[in-house]
Amino acid sequence: MRKVVDGGVTQGGDLGYKGAEGRSLFRPTDIEVGPDGALYMAGWGSVYGTEYVPAEKWTAEENAKYQGRLFRLRHKENALIDRKKWDTAKRKKTLAEWTFDELIEDIGHQLQVWRVNAQDELVRRGSAVRKPLIDAIDSSNLTEAQATWSVWALGYIDGRSGNSRTITDYALANREADLNVRIQATRILGEKMAKDAIPALILLLDDKEPRVRLAAVQSLGQVGWSGNDDAILQALADETDRLALYSSWQVMRRQLPLEKRRALMGDDRAVIRLMAALGLMEERSATPEQVFALQDDDDLRISSVASDWLQKTGARKANVVLAAAERNFRERTKVSMKASGDYDVLFTTDDSTPKAGGTASKYAGELTIDKDTVLRAAAFASGRQVS
């Protein structure tokens, strides 16, 4: 006996469809909402692409392979949007004949092809529509989609002349702009490789809105740092947002040479050390010696990343066990150290990290401790730390 459950039934109830063997007709590849409110789906039919068949071999079966290339899905009880509402008089004219307002109406439409066509026409008109375009953006009357596509149209127009002043003003909020327009403007500066906007992009790295900071660091990655390394690193040193921080170290590893990033692993700023370490690890350019030194970093993020890297790469081949006769003693205690393998053990008694060639001592036998002491020990093989 088997209990019947309704887990696979749609909310609309039984649709009457029964699965059967044979070629699948419905293989959707794209979906879009049409101006009439219906869903339009393109599909491959029962074959991928097309196959050449001579006319004399063209049969009903061959013809069936190419059926089902376009589907329209609508609700049988709900009427579609009246054609008169979307197939208006302007659709009978060429785009060059449309008014500015008619283009702005389409630039935020749900149909991507209409948005693209409207934006392309505005860009084609160039300086002739620049002022009304700015006025429309400044009006705050546009939808988010209209504002997005409009400010990008302005960016393309200004990009032709190399003028990034207005877009920069939007990014810095020197002009009336909501958050979306500021983010889009910041991205445009990178897309258009606006080197004159580098100082503004550096300022935006300190913006209170993390999405603006993210857009700024990505744009700097496109434009290039152009010798502004110190100013950019200083701004990035306070980054706290997860996504902005990830983008920052990815951009940094593409903008700074390897040796400089290795040097930054010893930087005084924790975020800079973290970004440098992550970039080197990503490229497999970090050495065990460099990463072992990060295990004792004051920043928990860095010490955790270092520990994970050493474990996953197999660089940590040994561990050292310290044993004391008495951890809490009145006069003295005996301490022994042992590595898990045939390795040398180096230790310090001043809470410093043991390093080959440094002040660390080589363990040769049991130690006698008669005062408060912080012991640190590590295993070494041929001068290289392995624990």
Image (cartoon, grey):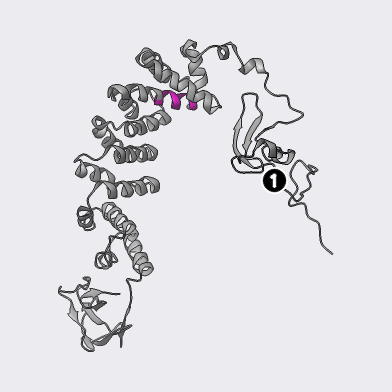
The span shown in magenta is 145-152
Left or right of residue 307, residue 38 in this image: right
Residue found at x 27% / y 35%: 203
Specify the quadrant that holds the C terminus.
bottom left
- Along the line of sight, which residue is nearer the eye, 199 or 68? 68
Q: Quadrant of residue 225?
A: top left
Residue found at x 15% / y 74%: 357
Q: Is residue 66 above or below residue 79?
A: below
- Give the number of callouts: 1
Q: Using the rendered image of the protein, determine whether residue 206 is visible from the camera's viewpoint.
A: no
- Rendered location of residue 168, percent (x, y): 30, 27
Q: Secondary structure at mark 1?
A: loop
Question: Dominant secondary structure of the magenta stretch?
Answer: helix
- Rendered location of residue 109, percent (x, y): 54, 24
- Rendered location of residue 14, percent (x, y): 80, 44
Q: Which residue is mark 1?
A: 24
Q: Using the rendered image of the protein, determine whether residue 307 is visible from the camera's viewpoint.
A: yes
Q: Is residue 149 magenta?
A: yes
Residue found at x 21% / y 39%: 226
Left or right of residue 145, residue 364 in this image: left
Q: Quadrant of residue 230?
A: top left
For mark 1, does the 10 Å Cα neighbourhood hold few (<14), some (14 to 19), or many (20 or more) residues? few
Which residue type carries mark 1?
Answer: Ser
